[in-house]
Amino acid sequence: AAGIHDPLWTRAIAFRNNGVTVVMVTLDSIGIFHDRYISVRKALDPELGIDHVMFSATHTHHAPDTMGIWSRNPVFQDFDHDYLNHVLEMTREAVEESIRALEPAEMIAAEAIVEPEGFVRDTRDPQCFDRRIGAMRFVRPGTDETIATVVTWGNHPEAVTSRNNLVSSDFPHYLRLGLEEGVPEPSGIDGFGGMALYFQGSLGGLMTPIGLEVPLRDGSGVISENSFEKAEALGYNVAIVVAEALRGEEAWRETRSKVGVAARTFLAPIEGMYKYAIMLGLVHPGYYWGGKARSEINVIRIGDVEILTCPGELYPEIVEGCVEAPEGNDFGLTEPIEYPGLRSFMRGRMNLVINLANDEIGYIIPKSQWDTKPPHTYGRERPPYGEVNSAGPDVAPTYYREAVSLLEAFHAAW
């Protein structure tokens, strides 16, 4: 890094009702491993009465390495432990501050449907997108005074690409700025004030702004070049969609304020180079015999909004129910395993899936779409991108099974 374009954040929002206290945290980080998050939970003041903390990374590609995958040289040990410890300490402070700042609030919620054109590209067949942008706005009772706005949407924060050498959160910076302070003219909007929190949605597959043409608000054309100008245009365009949804006729004011949470540890079966890296203690502590890594799934309910978490980068097919079993997949599968889509098991008026939550175990790819050996799927001449950064073909079926089971158990209790 040669400088700072915009500051990185850890932001936390707390919910308390019916004897349950939950905190949701979002960090401007490429990802953080499960054991590090557990250390934050253990360091929290027990007097605050927190039942659960859910952590999530925005997955910005322009932040210092917090995983040790890109900077851990086996000879020189370049990984910056001090920086990671600083991030974790700031996160602990943010969580505790959110609890101490608890106050009565009302929730306004809305969901916007956006088509991919101008917003996101899917670089791998089948073309499947989570077209939903979920938003919640919290105001002081009887007023229009905003405490916080929460947004979930799936896209890689890499609009300025790897050629950039400035620290940045990429488009989430402008998305948050637009919701807080407003989007400038032309075709701008007034901001809500308060604090905006962006949680990463389903972005595997690979959901990206690279190669995307983002429209300019003045209607004069599009931005094709990967740059901060593209990140700004994309972030502000999403902010406009969110603001219009929250101010629109389809937005609803929540009348049921009950809060609920369920959390489950599970063991993800790891294969390939990550299996051996975990065995050697190089990445992701928590190795279990047979090649498994400990990870976590949460279900959170805020009134009529239901949230499912994923500890990696989930392919939208698994959420939306468009998993395919193309000819040439490595296992000869003729039917998808992770079907129907996870959203069909959710019971909220609005259902959100947050990625990179409590962990980062890489791309979570439908097993019937796994493709490392010829003949390749969809007529490709070479293997697609994704498998090289995945923990293995059995992670998706395991996560899917555990997520469905946890949702069913949560609904029974709820």
Image (tube, helix red, strand yellow):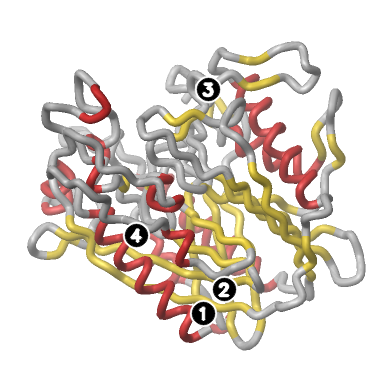
Residue 350 versus residue 150: which sits nearer the camera? 350
Mark sitting earlier along the chain (4/3): 4
Taking the spot 20% from the left edge, 35% from the top edge, the residue there is 327
Q: Residue under label 3, please give it.
A: 160
Residue 242 versus residue 179: which sits nearer the camera? 242
**Residue 387: quarter of image:** top left
Which residue is farthest front?
334
Taking the spot 49% from the left edge, 74% from the top edge, the residue there is 52
Q: Taking 164 as reference, is 151 above or below it?
A: below
Q: Are marks 2 and 1 in contact (CB under 8 Å)?
A: yes
Q: Taking 233 as reference, is 413 above or below it?
A: below
Q: CA distance from mark 2 to mark 1?
A: 6 Å
Query: Is residue 404 left or right of 239 when viewed as pictured?
Result: left
Q: CA distance from mark 4 to mark 3?
A: 28 Å
Q: Position of residue 253 (x, y in %)?
A: 79, 66
Q: Are marks 1 and 3 in contact (CB under 8 Å)?
A: no
Residue 12 versus residue 208: which sits nearer the camera? 208
Taking the spot 55% from the left edge, 25% from the top edge, the residue there is 3
Q: Are marks 4 and 1 in contact (CB under 8 Å)?
A: no
Q: CA distance from mark 4 to mark 1?
A: 18 Å
Q: Residue under label 2, please give it.
A: 22
Q: CA distance from mark 1 to mark 3?
A: 38 Å
**Residue 99: quarter of image:** bottom right
Q: Residue under label 4, please give it.
A: 34
